[in-house]
Amino acid sequence: MSKVEADVVVIGAGASGIAAAVAAAEKDAKVIVYEKGSTTGGAANMGMGFFAVESRHQKAQMIDLTLDQAFDFFMEYTHWHADARLVRKYMAQSADTIEWIESLGVEFLGVYKYFEKSFPTWHVVKVPGSNKPTERSASVMFKALTDRAVELDVELNFQHTVKKIQKDPETGRITGVSVVDEQGNQIDCECDTLIVAAGGFGNNPEMIKQMTGYTWGEDLFSFRIPGDDGDGVNLMWDAGAVKSPVNVELTYTTPGITDIFKTLSETMRQPNLMVNLEGLRIFNEETMQNTTFTGNAISRQTGKTAFTIISDEIIEDYKKTGLDYITFHHNIKTVDKWQSEIDAYKSGGESETAGLSDLHGEDETGQVCFWEANSLEELCEKTGINYKNLQATIEEYNDCEGSYDTLFNKHPKYMRAIKGKKFYAAIHRPCGYGTLGGVKTNDMLQVLDAENKPVPGMYSAGFDACNIFGDSYCFLLPGNTMGWALNSGRMAGYNAVDYLDSDDFVE
Ligand SMILES: Cc1cc2nc3c(=O)[nH]c(=O)nc-3n(C[C@H](O)[C@H](O)[C@H](O)COP(=O)(O)OP(=O)(O)OC[C@H]3O[C@@H](n4cnc5c(N)ncnc54)[C@H](O)[C@@H]3O)c2cc1C
């Protein structure tokens, strides 16, 4: 067994961990990072950008959302369940974090909404040499943060897994961590402060089941990012942290289609009729762009499923007008590839644009998730939707074509009747980017015990400590999880070093 020493140890070099390491090292601390995988950036390498308010980019784009407005909106959204002091600090630092990242040579493409009704807060990272939005562009930023960490003499250890947090039995103070490297060698690292940034448990179906009630592969088809196995929260719970409620950062997916057959997927994510297995509408489909709200509505239904139903006449409409909703990251505007993608899907063929499909982990294409039929009755036989109810639903829905939606007040322009010679259905299921929460912190990112007191020397950031959204991720202020990860990591890094210099720290 070897022994090493640091002022600050960081567990995980993902979005929050690498930000924490750089921040602590900027304050001249000796920082050691242990990362289980072989890269920095974690799940955030898959993303494109992050939240900030009152940044110079927003000012340049004449976006007049203020810190106060964003804060008020956020706190109302969470019904003040979130720690207001922490949210305020996060948001107040967010514009400076853009400058902090830019000081590393990273550029931003601009500030964007994620969907029409959201606020323009998503600062999308530019890939050098390209002016196009690019999936996974945030990885550029993590390369820059890693270079900065190396420049500041942060010791980065890859394929090193932290197995235990050590504490002084008398004072309860953090004294170190036990680590195992890829050869199985054990390392004991003494440290005075610890920042746990291990990414939640999006890759751990047992914990997902236990803590959220979803069964991965049955009623949840979330991204599974290698490494995000729940080690961080388990280590902290074992070391005295109190458990906090956990949510999935919810979205929705059509397994085997979303992120794979992009025209097919985007066409079945337009604001058209959505019903549950009982054949009843479940919400105003105009809301579909808010993937969290849609995920919530789907999760309430029998089998946690819902179906979008369209007809060939709607496809003919889209051939003339283009799609109603165009997402920034997929940018599918037409239905030009509609038939070719259906054919490829049915024959089990490959898509030209596999996108992020590989991130869902195990094979999910075994089940049929898209159907065609020559009548509504046939569609119901294939999907299991209640035919009698669907007939009544469609009758009522079609009566409102192009006019007032008597049930849910959907905008008349999206009230496209379900009629024609051919009908299509796609099933939607809950999906998630990761898990939110597990431990409770105060506004300094200090991890709290069952008595609401800080565990001396223990900090947490990112997914593990993400309790700021209440019951649902706030997609209305887009870029908020990576924004939270970077900013909570940065704050934890600074605070951990300040703690070492304070009277609270007793050696
Ligand atoms: C496909 C996809 C796209 C996304 N796009 C966006 C976006 O555009 N904007 C946005 O705001 N958010 C986005 N997110 C969410 C964002 O990626 C997360 O909020 C962010 O990565 C969380 O950071 P983190 O540091 O908590 O976890 P991670 O970034 O996942 O890092 C955790 C790290 O800890 C390591 N680790 C775990 N256990 C141990 C251990 N025992 N010892 C050592 N290391 C360990 C892991 O290997 C991992 O590298 C996206 C997520 C996904 C999946």
Image (cartoon, grey):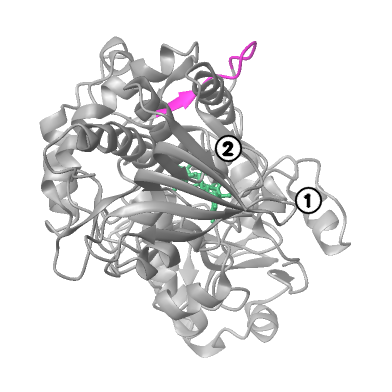
Q: Secondary structure at mark 2?
A: helix
Q: Crowding near pointer 1: few (<14 within 10 Å), some, many (20+)?
A: many
Q: Nearer the viewer, residue 46 or 427?
A: 46
In the rendered view, would you say 168 is above or below 318? below
Q: Residue 333, image x and y in percent?
A: 60, 35
Q: Residue at x 33, y 32 (%)?
A: 490
Asked whether the viewer can see residue 251, the reply is: no
Residues in magenta?
123-131
Q: Is residue 107 left or right of residue 444?
A: right
Amino acid at the residue labelled 1: Glu
- The span from disc 1 to disc 2 (Cα, nearest Å) is 28 Å
Point out residue 493 in the picture as x, y percentages from the top left corner.
33, 34
Q: Is residue 198 among what the camera can see?
A: yes
Residue ID for mark 1: 341
Q: Secondary structure at mark 1?
A: helix
Count all numbered tags in the image, as a single digit: 2
Q: Is residue 289 shown above or below 450?
A: above
Q: Is residue 159 left or right of residue 466?
A: right
Whether the residue carrying mark 2 lies under 8 Å from ligand 1 is answered with yes
Disc 1 within 8 angstroms of ligand 1 (CB): no
